[in-house]
Amino acid sequence: MIYGMTETEAPLAAAHDADWSSLEHGPAVRRLLSGLAGGDAAAGSTAIGQLYRLAPDGADVRPWVVAALPVLLGLVADPARPDRERLLRLAGDLAGADRTWQMSGQTLRAKRVLAGYAGLTGLLTDTDPRVREAAAYTVRAVARLTPALPGLLRQRYVDEPDPAVRVTLLCSSVLTGAVGSGYQPTKRWLAWVADSDADLRVRITALTELMALADPPPFDVETARDTVLAAYREGLNREPEPVDDVIAPLRSGQRMAARQWTPGYPQVVSAVRAAYRNDVDAQLDLLERMLDLDARDARHDGLHQALALAQRLRGRYTALVTRAAALLHDTDPQVRAAALRLLHGIGELARPAADAVWAALPRVQRRIRPHDGPVTWIAEGTPGPVLGPAVHLLSALRDERVLPVLHRLLDEAPDTAGLHQRIAGYGVRAHGLSRTLRRRLRALPAGHEAQRAGLLHALTAVAPDEAADHLVREPIDVTTLRLLARAGRAAAGRAPAIRAALTGGDPDLELAAADAIWQVAGDAEAAAAVYDRYFDPRYTGVEHAVAAIDGLGRLGVRVAGRSRHLAARMRGRTDAAVVVAIAGALWRITADRNAARTLGPVWESAPRLRPRIARLWVETGDARYAGRYARAELGTALRHNGGRHGLPAPEIDRDERLLARCRELLAQAG
């Protein structure tokens, strides 16, 4: 449509009144504005794009913007124009609608021109919903020049029938109102909107904006749960269309949003979970619903949240693990990676998924090389190759199907980080790898001490008798002494060197030598003499005292004469870890249950000692005494060793073993 002179004469007059020749790009802008005023749709669209590209000047805009705003606002005032919404958004972008903080230079002058336009707030009630939405966006530019704007926007939200306009009104209300004294009222208003609006997009936008603010107020958790699930289901968190970088810094907020994966949905899920506190069943129900949705982002975010849940709370995770195992074959690579990351991070809880992980592991026939993708044998780490998460998980579960994989890695990628430790975890079940381990040790050049230590550790674990030959020339230190102790009588030739270390002066060295001399030579007295020097924490550290007392416990009835001193030490004021160690030693030395029956207060005051206490109670069979503590532990949702940060898989396993022993105690009690 070509508009008549009467409809365009005012904007044209404004365009001719300015001294365009004195402004940078002025003549070009004048022609573009005249083209807009002419009314040709194709020419107008081209002109708008050109104006966007001519406006930026670093972080500011060029001086012609101030002269062009009255022309654009005059065009917007014409109700017959079909492009009013685009022109109004252009005016807002030129005046810094997404740069509310910028109050200097040409942008500030443009904001003042826009704030002085009498019809700006009136456009919020225009008959065209597209114009109302553009107005709700554009008024952000004058937020700091119009103190009453937040209240006006919230009132307009109440009266606005169109959901898309309400979304923009909501976002503008937060941007303009969540500052200073308006911060708390804005949060309360968002919570009300999230609980009460009839439109899904408005509710989820309110929730995401609310969670982006610090310390959100209480909200209806069930409504929020249903809202975020429905938003995932409807795909409302799809990635926005990218914005042309040429027009930076205009539309800076849109440009950042275009690079954002999801608009705050994970934060909403976290807030809902936090509202459930320690109700693990309610949280599991939410996450399982997310994993069942036919929505990539819901599955990805649910898997990520599930790891945080399992690290903090105890629960029945079998169904979740089974679902994660099925998602190892999802069509989306990010979902597959998230599923494997979850299983890799929860230790023994992932055992039901072992078959699925094994099925997803490639059967590589060519030479092994690190490559992209979560389900691989090895991956590239910072210092070098590392075990892939699937192999790491299966080997941590001691799954013997992965032993051939470890064997081949030992041949073709022996410097893979963590490889030797994983082999050692199998113990004698990995005896078939001993020949390759010995060959690797013989071929290892000098200077590779870390790799040599790893190979020796693995060989000593899988074939202790064969490791003795390779330990003959190793220097005596704490690491070597521990390997000799594991090798046992096969390392008898190194007994003289071990004896020399019994009086080395270093507590760690002497305690390691004491254990080695007992395991290698069977000399209980020599070992006990060292333990006697360290079992009293008044004269040594708690860590060394516990190690010495544990050593006496391993010697058993051979050191029965020390039991009286141990019992006396237990009655004195001493560290809780020492008390537990003494109770265990007295049981193993004299079969005295009485000390173990006094550990209830320690159980209550030192949660991290509970696995050790529970193991002792299972050994002594004190189910009647221990039953109430075991029952209370099984009724506690929080992991005993939990903290503010997530637990690694070994710590989750430690807590699960504690629960298993508590169940065993209750079974003993009948």
Image: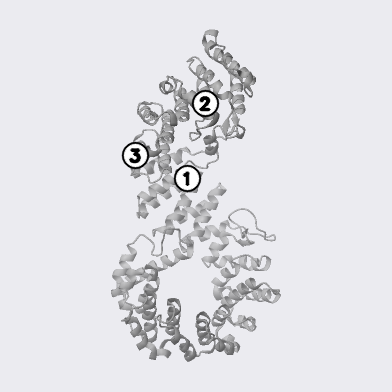
**Above or below, 33 relative to 588:** above
Q: How is the image coloured?
A: one colour
Which amino acid does the dot numbered 3 rest on? Answer: Arg
Label 2 vs label 3, nearer the camera: 2
Residue 644 in picture, x, y percent from top left:
42, 58
**Above or below, 376 relative to 179:** below
Please tell me how crowded label 3 is: few (under 14), some (14-19), or many (20+) other residues with Cα within 10 Å: some
Name the image quarter holding residue 553.
bottom left
Per the rendering, the mark at residue 110 is 2
Residue that carries the numbered disc 1 in the rendered image: 298
Residue 465 in picture, x, y percent from top left:
59, 82
Residue that carries the numbered disc 3 in the rendered image: 188
Q: Secondary structure at mark 3?
A: helix
Decide if residue 51 is on the left or right side of residue 439: left
Q: Residue at x 51, y 44 (%)?
A: 296
Q: Residue at x 70, y 75 (%)?
A: 446
Which amino acid does the dot numbered 1 rest on? Answer: Ala
Residue 259 in picture, x, y percent from top left:
55, 40
Query: Can residue 273 be seen in the rendering of this structure?
Result: yes
Please tell me how crowded label 2 is: few (under 14), some (14-19), or many (20+) other residues with Cα within 10 Å: many
The answer to which of marks 3 and 1 sits earlier in the sequence is 3
